[in-house]
Structure formats: structure tokens, C-alpha cells
Amino acid sequence: MSDAFVKIDLHGLRQEEAIARIDRAIASAGSGTYQLHLVHGFNRGTSLRTMIRDWYQYDPKVKRIMPGDNPGVTVLVLKELY
């Protein structure tokens, strides 16, 4: 994966499936990947949003977690842009 900003659609996934997909994306992120934009949705995706924030806040590859450009997106920052 060599894109600087990677978008991952998590709509309709259970938490275990979402974790597996996110973990694969983090593991395959290249040195040029700065952020993972996790699209979980707003109405039914809030449980995924909570899980993402709780699960990945202590991941050593994730520098920080921030809200996306809308409430249905969460961004995992893997590398800071300077």
C-alpha cells in the first residue's frame, strides 16, 4: 500500500471483521502512508467508531486518532505530515 491517504470502507462489518481489515491495512502500510481514513458510518457505525478509538489508542503504529471530515469517518494517523 503506497498511497499517502488510504480510505477503508467498514460499512456493514462486525467489530471483529473491521479489526481484521484495519490490522491488515496497518501492517501493509508503506513508508509513504500517512493516514487511514476509516469510513464506518454515523447512524449504525457509532459502535465501530467507539471500538476504533478504544482498540487503536494504544497501538504503537498509530500516532494519534482524530475525527474525519464528517461524523462517519475516523482517521488513524500513522505518520505526521511536516
Image (tube, rainbow, N blue to C red):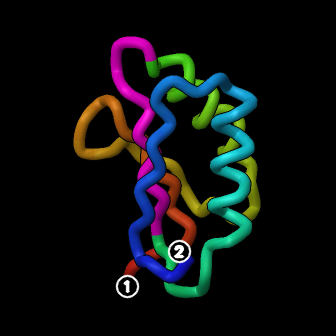
Residue 64 in percent (x, y) is at 54, 55
Element on which disc 2 rests: loop
Quadrant housing residue 30: bottom right
Residue type (three-letter) at the residue carrying disc 1: Tyr
Quadrant housing residue 56: top right
42 vs 22, left or right, is left
- Asked if residue 30 is positioned above or below residue 76 in the image, the reply reads below
Residue assigned mark 1: 82
Quadrant location of the C terminus in the rendered image: bottom left
80 vs 24, left or right, is left
Frontmost of labels 2 and 1 is 2
Residue placed most toward the observer, 46 or 58: 46
Residue assigned mark 2: 79
Crowding near the residue tagged with mark 1, few <14, some 14–19, many ≥20 C-alpha atoms within 10 Å:
few
Residue drawn at (41%, 40%), measured in percent from left and top? 39
Element on which disc 1 rests: loop
Which contiguous range is marked in magenta? 35-44
